[in-house]
Amino acid sequence: MQGIDITTPRGHFHVRDSTGDGTPVVMLHGWPESSYCWTHVAAHLDPRWRVIAPDLLGLGDSGRCAELERYRKQSLAADILAVLDAMQIDDFLLVGHDWGGVVAQEMAIAAPARVRALVLMNIALINNLRGNLEVIENQRNSSSFAIWYQHFQQTELPGKLIPGNERHWLGYFLQSWGGEFPADSFEEYVRMYSIPGTPETGANYYRSMNDDITRWAGLAGHVYPMPGLYIYGKQDPVITPDYLNHHEDCFEQIEVVEIEAGHFLQEEQPQQVADHLNRFFKQTLANYSAFA
């Protein structure tokens, strides 16, 4: 995939693009990664798909800004829609992992007619109020240690303690939350997290959570109309199986598949993830054609 830089009224964004005239597949990364996380999956995808993988604000090689409201996930979704407008991409297949999965959901709410299918990987469903409240109650009862980093990042400490310690900081997550993590990916995220300001902009994804949660409480009852696929790495210590409770209430149609992987399933098991994406996208487009 080639790297391109796109400037929109919302800022500067770096995008990995396989180019060509295939069906666009927009792939959104989470924290603490960048669009590089799709590199190994893309190698196994059908060439009929045009992979478009932007770096989200504050991560990868996209711009950094300090304004906390810009990291609300509804705002990040507007960023990506603006990038796609600049690329003259109208409708697309959409994939999101971790925070990228939340941004993908916000895009599906903001522009449902443009999202032909929605694939989510190891992230909460923001319209699943009942299920998410159950998760919060379970975490409260178990004093879940796994989410300590979310609280840490809401303090002023990341900008003071992480610079110079990026390899140790990232290694804790990337090399312990599942299976074998690719060395090339790890080195890329160390490089990216060493860009000045990134520990703070990365932390802003968590500092904006309270505003996000307030918004999502009003989404109970929303149903995603497009076909959905949820690929779940079942060794994830953070996104536990109870996050999928009541998932069927959130989509008009949804398929869930589990694979032997941890949180970073797209890098731990890229072949399996690509196989599921190829199958699902082909099936989705075939159904579109049948009813066109």
Image: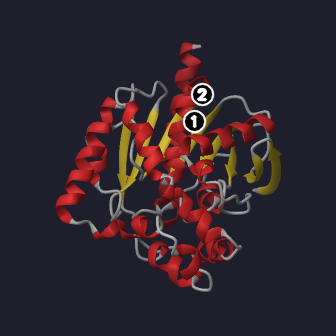
Which residue matches tag 1? 107
User: In x, y percent, where is residue 65?
Assistant: 70, 58
Mark 1 and mark 2 residues within 8 Å of each other at the beta carbon: yes
Residue displayed at 35% across by 62% down: 238
Residue farthest left in this picture: 141
Which residue matches tag 2? 111
In this rendered view, identify the residue nearer to me: 51 or 130: 130
Kind of residue indicated by mark 2? Ala
Cα gap from disc 1 to disc 2, whole angstroms:
6 Å
Q: Is residue 38 visible?
A: yes
In this rendered view, identify the residue nearer to me: 104 or 211: 211
Q: Quadrant of the C terminus?
A: top right
User: In x, y percent, where is residue 163?
Assistant: 61, 81
**On screen, residue 55 above or below 72:** below
Quadrant assignment, res 132: top left
Tell whether 277 sits left or right of 150.
right
